[in-house]
Amino acid sequence: MQVHQVFDDHILLTPEESRQADAWTIDSGVAGIDLMEAAGRAVADIIVDYVGTPLEVGGEIIVLCGPGNNGGDGYVVARHLDEWGYPVRVVADLGISLKGDAKIASKRWRGPCDSAGEKPLKGASVIIDSIFGTGLSKPVEGVFADMINEANDLDAFKLAVDLPSGLNALTGSPMGACFCADATVTFFHRKVGQIVAPGRFYCGGADHIHVADIGISDAAIEEITLQHFSNEPGLWSHAYPFQGPASHKYDRGHLLVLGGKEPTLGASRLASMAALRAGAGLVTLAASSETYSIQAGALDDVMVRRFDSAFGFIGIMSDPKIGTVLLGPGAGVGEKTAELVMQATLKGRNMVLDADALTSLVGRLDVLSNVTGCDIVLTPHEGEFARLFPELDYQTDRVSAARCASKLSGCTVVLKGVSTVVAGTDGRVSVACNAPSWLSVGGTGDVLSGIIGSLLAQGMPAFEAASAAVWLHGEAGMRAGRGMIASDLLKQIANVLP
């Protein structure tokens, strides 16, 4: 059995889906203790990769074991490390009677086992958290909370088994005391809460979440309707608009961008240029008469057309070659912008609504919920989201909030932030974890909306287009590096295209 393998896939499981997969595997004939043995061995292997030989460890390896199967995994980890010559000690609440497979695993451990609180953890070089796994649904209290808090205060390498104890495996939020790991080893597939911030930081960061193959077949989830995904190319590459050698600009879509107002004229320019860089064949920026000369003089690669009223904008949009419209960047907040959005809904064009367009629609999102025959993508940051959907608490459960917002609006919703969540109208959700912190600078959201509009114009479905754009945006930010400004992203988009 292969037990030490890092997967590169985009499936995320909820706690219930993870439980179903375990149950299916056991029902199909794999003994629970065999899964536990495989899990413990995989964790031990990965720990060795991190800490080196027994001589390099420099102190004790302490395994914190809880009362259930996660604790049973810990006893297996301890046994293997002990057999390989590492100095190992188990710490557990010895007043709790273990059951089932966990009891079997504990009986196989012959090394030292201290009761929680009996000896300090101080002096440990490595602390392994095997207290609670994905099934935890309430805050950690009592002796286990004390163990977690003491471990967090120590300068030791910390690794979590399956999930840091105290972390909600669905929302990524800590529930009371929460183990803060430098790395995490999970099983079969990653969990939603390991990717959504702040969960991934408690796990040690996205690059330090390891997925071990412990013998659960992919058939275990064939009957599950998977709806949670890490935003990676494997999720959307099947729908990406790769252009053939005979393609021309009219095959690559035509995007119309609503031009901005002073002092934010650059927002619509950034969006327009990002759309071209992301592959749109044609981009037109509609500028009012007072800004036309400025916009036309600043843009060499984007067509600029003049308009002076909602009727004039709709006239530009009536061009049958224009399939997608982007409204919002620098457009100004008010009735005029709201009127342009409402008029655009009547034309059956795909739309990306960002920034000022979103704020202008506060309290009247119902104009979008009945639109049919086109895709609409909303791209709110957290402040805009709170104004648009005041009844939804994105701080408690970011994924559920984005999904509910999509259902309420009838639109694909891109909730931007440390963990940008894309929620599709079919219930699917993607969570991004590749965006660097230095993307938080003015104008980067305009670039993102331009990429989304470009991919929509090129024929990608809304969920895939938004997810791909978010991933490309994050990768471009990584390439641009610290100190970047929004226009730096434009230079990097071509370098990260699939």
Image (cartoon, rainbow, N blue to C red):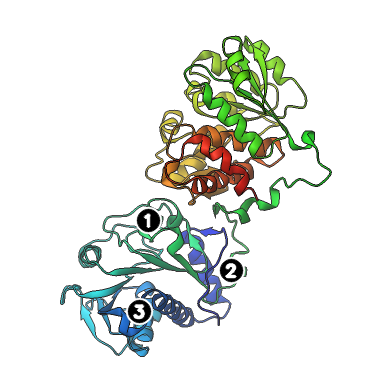
- Could you tell whether 247 is left or right of 284 in the image? right
Label 3 residue SS: loop
| Residue 407 showing in the rendered view | no
- Of the residues shown, which amino acid type is indicated by label 1? Phe
On the image, which quarter does residue 49 sit in? bottom left
On the image, which quarter does residue 182 sit in? bottom left
- Of the residues shown, which amino acid type is indicated by label 3? Lys
Label 2 residue SS: helix
Which tag, 1 or 3, sits closer to the chain's start?
Answer: 3
Which residue is at the front of the view, 132 or 347? Answer: 347
**Do the numbered discs 1 and 3 sit on residues whose CB atoms are within 8 Å?**
no
Name the residue rendered at 53%, 29% in the picture.
354
Label 1 and label 3: CA atoms lie apart by 32 Å
Mark 2 Cα within 10 Å, few/some/many (few <14, many 20+)?
A: some
- Image coords of residue 87 (percent x, y): 28, 85
Q: Is residue 7 above or below residue 265?
A: below
**Do the numbered discs 1 and 2 sit on residues whose CB atoms are within 8 Å?**
no
Q: Is residue 2 above or below residue 83?
A: above
Name the residue rendered at 57%, 52% in the picture.
227
Name the residue rendered at 51%, 26% in the picture.
358
Quadrant of image for the N terminus: bottom right
- Could you tell whether 456 is left or right of 356 in the image? right
Q: Which residue is mark 3?
A: 99
Q: Which residue is mark 2?
A: 220
| Residue 41 showing in the rendered view | yes
Q: Which mark is residue 437?
A: none
Which tag, 3 or 2, sits closer to the chain's start?
Answer: 3
Q: Residue furthest right?
A: 246
Q: Which residue is mark 1?
A: 201
